[in-house]
Image (cartoon, rainbow, N blue to C red):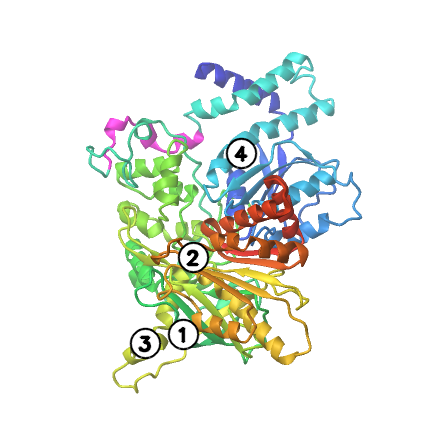
Amino acid sequence: MCLQCLKKKSTLFWEMCCDLKRRFLLLYATQKGQAKAIAEEICQQAGAHGLEADMYCISETDKYNLETEKDPVVIVISTTGTGDPPDTARKFVKKIQDKTLPPDHFAHLQYGLLGLGDSEYTFFCNGGKTVDRRLQELGAQHFYDTGLADDCVGLELVVDPWIDGLWLALKEVFLLQKEKEGMSSDAVSRSPSASLHVGHELNLSSEVQNLKLEDERVKSSDVLTQKPADIHHVASTRDTEPSLVHSVPPVSQSALNIPALPPAYIEVQFENTHGEDPRLSSLISEGKIFEVPVTKAVQLTRGDAIKTALLLELDIADTVFAYQPGDAFCVICPNNISEVEELLQILGLSNKGEYFVCVNVKQGTKKKGATRPQHIPERSTLKFILTWCLEIRAIPKKAFLRALVECTSDVGEKRRLQELCSRQGASDYTCFIRDSNVCLLDLLHAFPSCKPSLNLLIEHLPKLQARSYSVSSSNLYQPGKLCFVFNIVEFPACPTRPVSRKGVCTGWLAELVAPLLHPSKNTLDTKEGSYTTEKISIFARPNNTFHLPADPSVPFMMVGPGTGISPFIGFLQHRQKLREEHTDWEFGETWLFFGCRHRDRDYLFKDELRCFLENGTLTHLQVCFSRDSSTAEVAPPKYVQDVIRLHAKEVARVLLKERGYFYVCGDKKHMADGVSDAVVDILSMEMEVDKLEAMKILAMLREEKRYLQDVWS
């Protein structure tokens, strides 16, 4: 069908809807800002479609009422932890899960839900699924199919088409509402042909989106109307492979559908005055902040190990910080100071780093409900904002790329940024931005004519998140101490990032404790080994389930290769102390499956594990080494999942006959999935059932909180 015909039909449909009520309720529940950003995109696009969105955080229950809501509701909700709803949705979820609510409680409600998650984790999109399932149980009806977006492959792969289809679905709801109210006799015929027309429009919507190249979004840039031959790309025309700065056909020759330009809503004012920056505690809403000294640092791996693992000990004796083995806690960390200085230089603000900045909402902004981001102080130094408030390493979203287009003067660079944020350039965005972990600094180096303003960074860079770590100690065994273990994360240089980098938090911690690791290198005029005790700010992040069995006589198995062993050291310390204090108690057997690359390079806690074995705290220790060569006739197992298979009968006995617990901690993609597959195979074999039935049994063990995971991607 030609473009003119599609436009004509689309116009007719708009005319049918022109007199309808066009307001809908838009709710979001976010943990790190993703769901809110997507909701804002929906809210912004709504105006272009003649609709109005009333947008609220789902926790703002004083501003909306689902019990009386008559208009359609759109919900965008993320998932946190291993499948929990975000903190902002906990009260809402608790409220709708009230068992006394009747099955028709929300019978009047029509809604569409977009869930965000990561398939690297077992309970994918469980936050959204939980709300969706409960709303259905209470009688609510879908007006639009639920979307489940996967951050593992790229949220935009589901989010973008879901939003595209939302508008027609909403307009159909309004059309049907008007028909029911008996107000549509002049606008829409009730004949079957009219219904067919509406259905036909639904089928045509994707064609309209693909062919409509002259809408408001496209008109915002002159570059899009140029022929590809007129555009001078940064890279040589001899390049036949796409890169961050260079595209190839068909992208380089396509007319582009790009996102709408996000309206500016922040203004900043510099003050050359003195004062004090806010306390870090003012930036955190998750709980009480404790500033504690680092009293010990140990490198657990040999110098030639592929990864460097450190153990840090914190002194919490003078605080009320409480934890159990298996809990996690968060470290408040800064951005790398060299990167902050580099960013200031590129922005032309090097001489204003110590200036105070007042951040306010821009008067007359077109952004609906605009507020100053909660993680940005109303008044602080510029350096403080870039160091402690903004995640300058964040992978730029497409909306940010779209905004950067307007700050770029070179025509070729401008075009490439447009391609990277367009639908046509979706695969390039995934490959050269998302999968390459490109950050703002990388973009500014790759596109040197791009000169964004400070307010643009504040509008688009997310909050610098505190980093979570598993506790590796027991307060019963080491009163007043808290230990944790981590690998120093390394990002090697690559074509899209010419310099190597360390992880934001692990790199900072490693630098912070260097004097403890290498005291002799610490100075000239002081005594060898002396140092200033460094302090870090932490807050609790309790784990509600990843704890030792309440009954000490229950057996349990632990799987923790690499730094995944961390919480299990706390488990074993706690168990040893209980055995010492309660000699009359019965204690169940304990198993640990540990793996690493080399026995002599990265076998973490080797001596401690031997002691646990010798004193009976640990009953069985099974280890494997994936990179060590072997002269044995039968090669030893390389990975923990292989070792687990060798102990199939014991695993089945502990889990099924003795109703024991099974804990897994470590890498999700390369280990935890393999372990769960091994357990499924063991259950299938030992119970003589098919794989599907074995998977159901494992799901039951998860439900009973006897198969527990603390994993990361």
What residue is shown with label 2?
Answer: 390
Tell me the CA gap for discs 1 and 3: 10 Å
Q: Are marks 2 and 3 in contact (CB under 8 Å)?
A: no
In percent of width and height, residue 99 lies at 77, 48
Residue 686 drawn above or below residue 597: above
What residue is shown with label 1?
Answer: 297
Could you say which disc has been placed on residue 663 in the image? none
Could you say which disc has been placed on residue 162 in the image? 4
> Please, what is the three-letter code of the amino acid marked with disc 1?
Ala
Residue for point 34% across, 76% down = 515
Chain-order first, disc 2 or disc 3: 2
Callout 4: few (<14), some (14-19), or many (20+) C-alpha neighbours within 10 Å? some
Mark 4 vs mark 1: in front: 1
What range is drawn magenta here? 216-233
Q: Are marks 4 and 3 in contact (CB under 8 Å)?
A: no
What residue is shown with label 3?
Answer: 518
